[in-house]
Image (spheres, grey):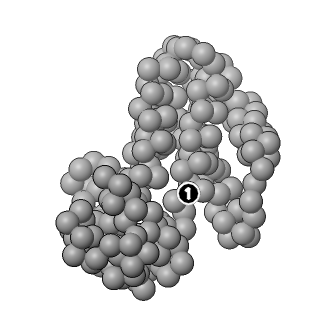
Amino acid sequence: MELRNRILAAAEQVILVNGLSKTTTKEIARIAGCSEGSLYNHFQSKEDLFMQVMKGHLHGFLEVLFKLNGHRGTRTVRENLAEVARGALDYFLLSILITASMFTEPGFLARHREGFQERNEGPHRANEIVTAYVRAEQKLGRVNARVNPRSVADLLLGGCFQHAFHLQFLGKEEPEEARVQFVEQLLMTLMIGLDA
């Protein structure tokens, strides 16, 4: 397990420096301190490595999303959506550079897209989960019945994605208090339209 984790960390490092197209399993193995053959004992291909790196980043955000349904009618809607926003920001900040490299490889992107469709996975699922949550809160009378639940999900997650994109593009580190303030301002604005 230790070697597998070293390989994953090395793969992420190489992808971030070189991009997906210029990443080689030979370079990953060198940084991980193992042979290229050992790498293939744990991963089928460079694409498999990439997917495992992505899944590692996604894990924490999925935990937040999967808890959301159980929060219907509990705490406040604002608290529940703030938890989603914080999870989304953490995920986007970690994954945006790696995800962007996928778009430089059209064949890989097509295969990745097909696999997600077959498994009913992909980035759209986060929006669907938040949409279902907002719709459920509408039925409970805790969210304004006139708002479009999908638009709420798109605004919440899209705002987090754009914020993370800007930070990465500008090469800025964001202090924790600034991130908390961003989430508070985003939710304050959203809640103006959501409050029942």
In the image, residue 56 above or below residue 32: above
Give residue 76's quadrant in the image.
top right
**Which residue is under mark 1?**
94
Q: Inspect this view and state whether residue 106 appears.
A: no
Count every numbered label the image shows and give the total: 1
In the image, residue 61 above or below residue 103: above
In the image, residue 142 above or below residue 177: above
Q: Looking at the picture, how far across and down is residue 101, in whole percent?
A: 47, 74
Taking 153 as reference, is 116 left or right? left
**In what quadrant of the picture does the C terminus appear?**
top right
Q: Looking at the picture, how far across and down is residue 65, in whole percent?
A: 46, 35
In the image, residue 73 above or below residue 96: above
Residue at screen point 24% across, 70% down: 38
Report the residue that reaches farthest toward the front: 33
Callout 1: SS: helix
Q: Nearer the viewer, residue 123 or 181?
A: 181
Q: Nearer the viewer, residue 174 or 148?
A: 174
Q: Inspect this view and state whether residue 92 appears.
A: yes
Q: Nearer the viewer, residue 29 or 142?
A: 29
Q: Looking at the picture, how far across and down is residue 148, in whole percent?
A: 54, 36
The amino acid type, in three-letter code, at marker 1 is: Leu
Residue at screen point 56% across, 45% down: 88
Residue at screen point 44% across, 20% down: 70
Q: Residues within 10 Å of mark 1 (few under 14, many from 20)?
A: some
Residue at screen point 75% across, 64% down: 172
Q: Looking at the picture, how far across and down is residue 108, in whole percent?
A: 31, 74
